[in-house]
Amino acid sequence: MITDEQRAARTARAVAAAVAAGRDLGITVTEPEVLYDVFSVIVRLAPSPVVVRVPTVLPRTTTLETQLADQRRELAVASWLAGQGLPVVAPSPLVPAEPVQRDGFSMTFWEYIEFVEDANLSVEHSAKLVAKLHAALREYPGELEFLNGLDPFIPDALAQLEDRPDLLAPADLDRARREWDVFRPMLESEEAFAEAFPGVTVQPIHGDSPGYNLIVTTEGDLYADFELVNRGPIERDLTFNGPEGIEAYNAAAEEAGLRKVDDGVLRTLEAVGLLQVVACLAMAPELPMLVDGLKPMIDQWRETPFPG
């Protein structure tokens, strides 16, 4: 496991890279501030209204090429949504909307938003906003991959955990692998998904629980964090919202001309989501907080009947 000192040094390197890259782009930086530090270090380049996201903990399967593709896709989608008038955290207008590589990091630049601390949105309110996002995203003209983020991440992560019984017990690892054998054939392509779930449409989706990635500001709620944007069923964005959230989404979806949530697809993708949580344990050596942070959902996974 990485030590606290090693993690602090990694954060410091990320901040230094963000500051240097920002200054190279003509941004005034005198008091950089770390706003968040988990999978990415989020740095405000104060006093300028610019925030830099510097990914620091990535799956082993992520290459520079795939990371650049993902970042360009995120910037393109966020820019397009902002252009459509959707309330979204947009790329910074002070620099080109393009990833910047510096000192071993690949980073993106965003507008700084004043957010309301400790704000809590009801699941019903969030679900309605997700329906509005889906209504906008279905018109997105760019190319997106189908359900990216599952393969090769899950099987590779499980392979890494084979030698880490301290992170995942052998019996749990065996179950996880058997689950992936169930899910992989139905999720490996749009064609395979259509065969497994006839009549269930797919479209551009956020890909990472958009209801939980809303930034509350004094001027309204903003959609954020499109790092995993892809094509897929809308249920992917609605996992673990509970019956109240699904009911609220369905009502808003009907008004927007969207289809309602398919219960079978939702149950499947919630099971896949739990399996992804298990796979994230492979990154715990680089981010030790995951061990305790993921425990409640891994306990939930253990208590969930095997899919079939």
Image (spheres, rainbow, N blue to C red):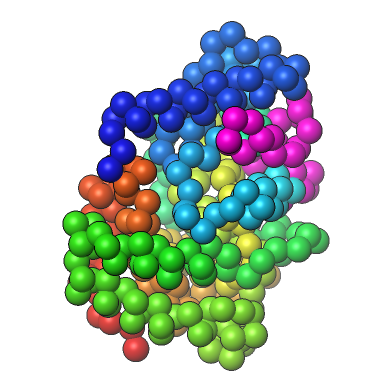
Instruction: Give how far across and how far down residue 163 sits, in percent.
Output: 27, 62
The N terminus is located in which quarter? top left
The residue shown at (78%, 33%) is 96
- Main secondary-structure element of the magenta-colored stretch: loop
The C terminus is located in which quarter? bottom left
Instruction: Give how far across and how far down residue 260 sits, in percent.
Output: 55, 74
Task: Tell whether 85 sits left or right of 237.
Answer: right
| Circle count | 0
Task: Tell whether 276 sits left or right of 62.
Answer: left
Q: Which residues are magenta?
A: 77-106
The residue shown at (56%, 78%) is 188
Q: Would you place residue 275 above or below residue 99 in this image? A: below
Figure quadrant of residue 307? bottom left
Q: Is residue 95 magenta?
A: yes
Instruction: Give how far across and how far down residue 293 sits, in percent.
Output: 28, 47
Figure quadrant of residue 242? bottom left
The residue shown at (57%, 83%) is 193
Q: Is residue 28 visible?
A: yes
Q: Residue furthest top?
A: 30
